[in-house]
Amino acid sequence: MSKDFDVVVYGATGFTGRLVAEYLDNEYGSDLKWAMAGRSLDKLKSVRDEMGVSDAVELIVANSDKPETLADMASRTKVVITTVGPYQLYGEPLVKACVEAGTDYVDLCGEPAWMVDIIDRYDAAAKKSGARIVLSCGFDSIPFDLGVYFLQQHAIKKTGKPSPKVRGRVRKMKGTFSGGTAASFMETMKRAQKQPEILNWLKDPFALTPNFEGPKQPHGAKPIHEDDLGSWSAPFIMASINTKNVHRSNALLGHKYGEDFVYDEMMFTSPGEQGEQIAQGIAKGNAFGDNPPKPGEGPSKQERETGFYDVLFIAETDSGKMMASVKGDKDPGYGSTSKMISEAALALVKDVPHSQTGGGVYTSAPAMGDALIKRLQEHAGLTFAMESS
């Protein structure tokens, strides 16, 4: 059955949703059949006019409180981009609608407990309907998930087998976490007070790989000095979600990285006593600060434009270390994230046929892999590079 749209942006009047709509309009314009969706038609019109988007871009009123509106929206498009979080509060009705319609779906979720629920409740149904439900298509976790995938591809090509151990290290980063990320974290903590088992899910690196548990993983909760890298490393707040997604990708790829695969993430500080002090401060501090942005708030355009990130991946192989990097040219939480989720959606629509993947609850590497890496480099300001091989 033909669809009215390639892409619908759900949450287009929110801060991140606006950035997604702006990116699609600027990068693809009339070459793409897309629509903007949200709760208020008046607000949608206002946002469309403010951004100078063509009147040809249709506006769709849809609301998680009215499942029938979500079902209608899902039936009309090939893929839905949703920026409406926290997903544990607002996300499930849209997942359900997309699964039932056989429509692809991408989100920015970094909420492991909710993701456990979605895998449990919808993976089998999505496989049956053909819907590809791809979670975590922003800074958490595309650069990390695809960075490991990219490096392992090279390891297999060079040595004939994957690396059994990879370290992800945030080398440099300028920018802020999104208000949605902070709100999602707080909602997860609230839920954990009512459901103590959630704390176990948060700690478990294999929480998203039902019926599989690999070897013990580094916890990454305390500063360490990495002699071989010449730097102190501190805990990285997003490691908890990224590591889970990397292990889910490995499982969905048929354990392409091996069933004994070990992966951890931290962030570099610097060498010497100063690096140790910074790392200790990060370990004790509040990663979101005293006044984190709220959903709907975010940095100025200048702050987004001057942001960046640089993540190093180090693989241990029989022939020595192999290193790769993933870099982004905008602030991670907003500017780069809005481009990544857009290209993830377009990779599903234009590059990866359903016959290649089938339906299910996915992460980015098994769903889109090389096609998404290509798109991100050609359109979204990311670079994937081998630094030593």
Image (tube, rainbow, N blue to C red):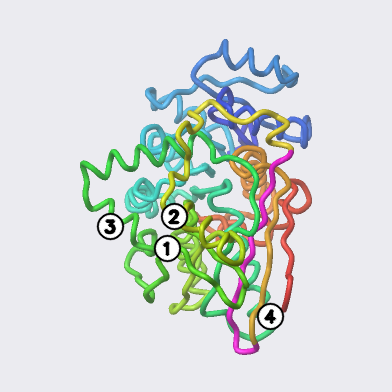
Label located before the other in sequence (1 or 4): 4
Describe the element under mark 3 as helix, strand or loop. helix
**Which image quarter holds the C terminus?**
bottom right
The percent coordinates of residue 140 (x first, y second) are 53, 50
Please check the rendered image and state whether residue 188 is part of the magenta-colored stretch, yes or no.
no
Nearer the viewer's eye, disc 3 or disc 4?
3
Label located before the other in sequence (3 or 1): 3
Label located before the other in sequence (4 or 2): 4
Q: Residues within 10 Å of mark 4 (few under 14, many from 20)?
A: few
The percent coordinates of residue 270 (x first, y second) are 61, 62
Nearer the viewer's eye, disc 4 or disc 2?
2
Horizontal relation, residue 179 to residue 196: left or right? right
For badge 3, the amino acid type reads Asn
Query: In which image quadrant can residue 159 be found?
Result: bottom right
* Residue at the spot of label 2: 283
Please check the rendered image and state whether residue 313 is part of the magenta-colored stretch, yes or no.
yes
Q: Which residues are magenta?
A: 306-319
Query: In which image quadrant can residue 283 be found?
Result: bottom left
For badge 2, the amino acid type reads Ala
Residues at marks 2 and 1 touching, judged by CB atoms closer than 8 Å: yes
Q: Is residue 130 above or below residue 250?
A: above
* Residue at the spot of label 1: 222
For badge 4, the amino acid type reads Lys
Furthest residue to the bottom? 318
